[in-house]
Image: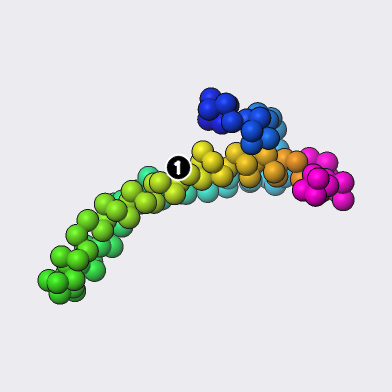
Amino acid sequence: MVATLGLGEAMCIKPPEFIIQSVGVGEPFITAIKISMIGGFVVGFPFIFWEIWKFIRPGLYQKERSATNGAVFICSVLFFNRDLVWLFYRFPFWYSLSNRLFDSGCNEQSYTFLHD
C-alpha cells in the first residue's frame, strides 16, 4: 500500500523481503491459529460487541438508553478505523524499523541510524 501511494521514499521504507523461518516444530501451525483467532476477532467485533450490548442494554434506564443510541455502530466504526490506520500507516514503519534493527544481529551499529 505504501508503494502505491508513493510514500516509500518519504517514509524510508523499502519493499519487504519475506523469509519464512520456523524455529520450533509446531510454530507454523500455532502461528496460523493465532492469525486466525485475531482475524476472527477483528472481523467479528461488531457482532461480539452487539451481543455484549444486548446483555447490558436491558439494565439501563430509558434516559441512559436514549443517550447511548448508536453506540454499537460508532464503536464498530472506530474499531475498524483503528485497524486501518495500523495496517496502512503504522505497520509499514514498524516493519521497516524492525528490519533495520534486527537484520544486522542487533549490535551497537544497528542503532546508529536513530542518532544521525
Q: How is the image coloured?
A: rainbow
Q: Residue at x 57, y 26 (%)?
A: 6
Dividing the picture into quadrants, the one containing residue 99 is top right
User: Is the residue 7 above or below the residue 102 in the image?
Assistant: above
Residue 64 in the image: above or below residue 34: below
Mark 1: give few (<14), some (14-19) or many (20+) Cα within 10 Å: few
Would residue 106 be counted in the magenta stretch? yes
- Which residue sits at x=54%, y=41%? 89
Residue 62 higher or lower than 18, as above or below:
below
Residue 97 visible at all: yes
On whether residue 82 falls in the magenta region, the answer is no
Image quadrant in which the C terminus is located: top right
Res. 36 visible in picture: no
Quadrant of residue 113 in the image?
Answer: top right
Q: Position of residue 5 (x, y in %)?
A: 53, 27
Residue 40, position in %: x, y?
Answer: 41, 46
Q: Residue at x 60, y 39 (%)?
A: 92
Q: Which of the two residues, 21 or 96, is positioned nearer the viewer here?
A: 96
Where residue 104 appears, as percent x and y from the top left, is 83, 41
Magenta stretch, residue numbers:
103-116
- Relative placement, left or right, of 73 versus 35 is left
Q: Is residue 16 left or right of residue 54?
A: right
List the residue tagged with mark 1. 84
